[in-house]
Image (cartoon, rainbow, N blue to C red):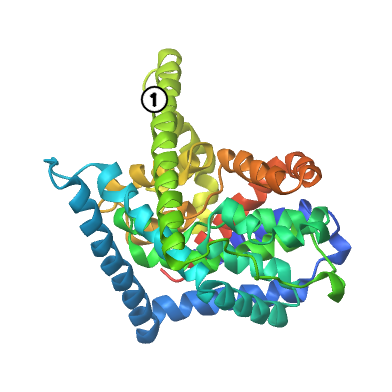
């Protein structure tokens, strides 16, 4: 029964994307089918085979080792502080972003990541028939944040029409930065966070290709990685990466303060009118029918739906902090589905971040992004639903 509900959820998700499509006649259904099969194979391999489980464990151990290195740096700077049991979220989690951003900056300067991303994108383009720039950006968004992913293809922006712009922006919103993954896996089960990365990439390319189908001439479809890094030495790359990571950590901390405080304010107002109910509970009831289709148990669906709704109206960190204390209370399947749903930037604040980034690259394109901002968010939510549903089929 759960599998039938999951299949129905996939059909409904793709159907909603179809209803939102700008040009239904140009949709590449072959590419959609190929990517759906790839998603199913990835999830089956990771969760249902010993080799896949070993790979997840190895990657998780690698991240944990990097976290240990990062904590050494944090300990040196903050070694004099006496932290209470459980530590301080900013010190124990967010400051790790600095070290991960430094690693990404160095790998970018050495052209290791750009080359890997370019050729993985080329393989995806070859298999699915999608344009190279969109495929490259989809892979690039797995490693870099919304702004960085878009800046990496700034030299190609003049080739992007409205549909192509929608796809690259959707990839930026539907992914997460690898520099933040270390923080995520300290809060939630790493196997679900890690499997969400490739699943979201393919889910986004599927949903975005349905909503905004493209047909690109070969002469307009070239990927240039010659200027992905402006650093002149490895030490400059380390310094700039550390500064960028510090900025991200402070931005996340500021957003958490603002969103959590605002959520408390909204709940205070709601409870003054309707005693005993919160915004999270309202969102839980709204999302619960969809949650049942995704595979969440009926007894847990309101609680899970409230967390998923919180992510949409605030951000993924706020929602993850709500899920973290419930990991031992909810079933493994619910935890997996909700974790995958949360592992993306699909929320209202991302519209402004993406529009601002595009404005810095091309003013005219920023106007276009502002027009389809809500459609971009709706598509990205469908991406999260699709990825979470696929995982639910194998739990």
Which residue is farthest bottom?
A: 51
Nearer the observer, 324 or 126: 126
The residue drawn where x is 48% and y is 32% is 282
Left or right: where does residue 188 sit relative to residue 228? Answer: left
Say few, some or many: other residues with alpha carbon within 10 Å of mark 1 (under 14 / 14 to 19 / 20 or more): few
193 shown above or below 309 = below
Left or right: where does residue 291 sit relative to residue 372? Answer: left
| Corner quadrant of residue 17 | bottom right
Residue 392 visible to the viewer = no
Nearer the observer, 380 or 366: 366
The residue drawn where x is 40% and y is 81% is 52
Residue 224 visible to the viewer = yes
378 shown above or below 174 = above
| Corner quadrant of residue 53 | bottom left
90 shown above or below 172 = above
Nearer the observer, 105 or 296: 105
Q: Measured from the top left, where is residue 106 in percent x and y?
A: 45, 67
Left or right: where does residue 64 sit relative to residue 351? Answer: left
Label 1, on which residue?
264
Q: Measured from the top left, where is residue 167 in percent x and y?
A: 71, 58
Left or right: where does residue 315 sit relative to residue 361? Answer: left
Q: Measured from the top left, where is residue 225 in percent x and y?
A: 65, 70
């Amino acid at each position: 029964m759960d599998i039938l509900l999951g299949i129905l959820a996939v059909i409904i998700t793709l159907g909603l994307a179809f209803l939102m499509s700008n040009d239904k006649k140009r949709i590449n259904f072959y590419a959609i089918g190929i990517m759906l099969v790839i998603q199913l194979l990835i999830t089956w391999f990771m969760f249902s085979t010993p080799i896949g489980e070993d790979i997840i464990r190895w990657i998780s151990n690698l991240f944990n080792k990097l976290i240990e290195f990062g904590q050494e740096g944090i300990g040196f700077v903050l070694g004099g502080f006496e932290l209470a049991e459980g530590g301080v979220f900013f010190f124990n989690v967010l400051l790790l972003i600095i070290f991960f951003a430094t690693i990404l900056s160095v790998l970018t300067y050495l052209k290791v990541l750009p080359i890997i991303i370019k050729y993985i994108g080329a393989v995806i383009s070859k298999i699915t028939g999608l344009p190279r720039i969109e495929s490259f950006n989809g892979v690039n968004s797995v490693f870099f944040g919304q702004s960085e992913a878009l800046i990496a293809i700034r030299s190609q922006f003049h080739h992007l029409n409205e549909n192509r712009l929608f796809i690259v922006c959707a990839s930026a919103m539907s992914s997460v930065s690898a520099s933040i993954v270390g923080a995520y896996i300290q809060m939630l089960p790493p196997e679900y966070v890690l499997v969400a990365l490739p699943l979201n990439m393919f889910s986004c390319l599927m949903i975005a290709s349905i909503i905004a189908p493209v047909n690109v001439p070969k002469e307009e479809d070239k990927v240039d990685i010659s200027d992905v890094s402006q650093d002149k030495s490895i030490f400059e790359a380390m310094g700039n990466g550390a500064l960028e990571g510090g900025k991200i950590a402070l931005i996340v901390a500021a957003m958490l303060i603002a969103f959590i405080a605002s959520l408390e304010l909204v709940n205070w107002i709601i409870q003054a009118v309707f005693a005993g109910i919160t915004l999270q509970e309202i969102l839980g009831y709204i999302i619960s029918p969809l949650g049942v289709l995704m595979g969440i148990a009926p007894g847990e669906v309101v609680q899970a739906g409230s967390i998923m709704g919180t992510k949409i109206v605030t951000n993924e960190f706020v929602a993850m902090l709500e899920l973290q204390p419930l990991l031992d209370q909810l079933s493994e399947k619910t935890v997996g589905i909700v974790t995958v749903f949360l592992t993306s930037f699909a929320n209202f604040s991302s519209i402004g971040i993406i529009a601002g980034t595009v404005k810095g690259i091309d003013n005219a394109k920023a106007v276009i992004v502002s027009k389809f901002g809500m459609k971009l968010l709706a598509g990205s939510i469908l991406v999260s639903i699709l990825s979470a549903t696929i995982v639910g089929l194998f739990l």
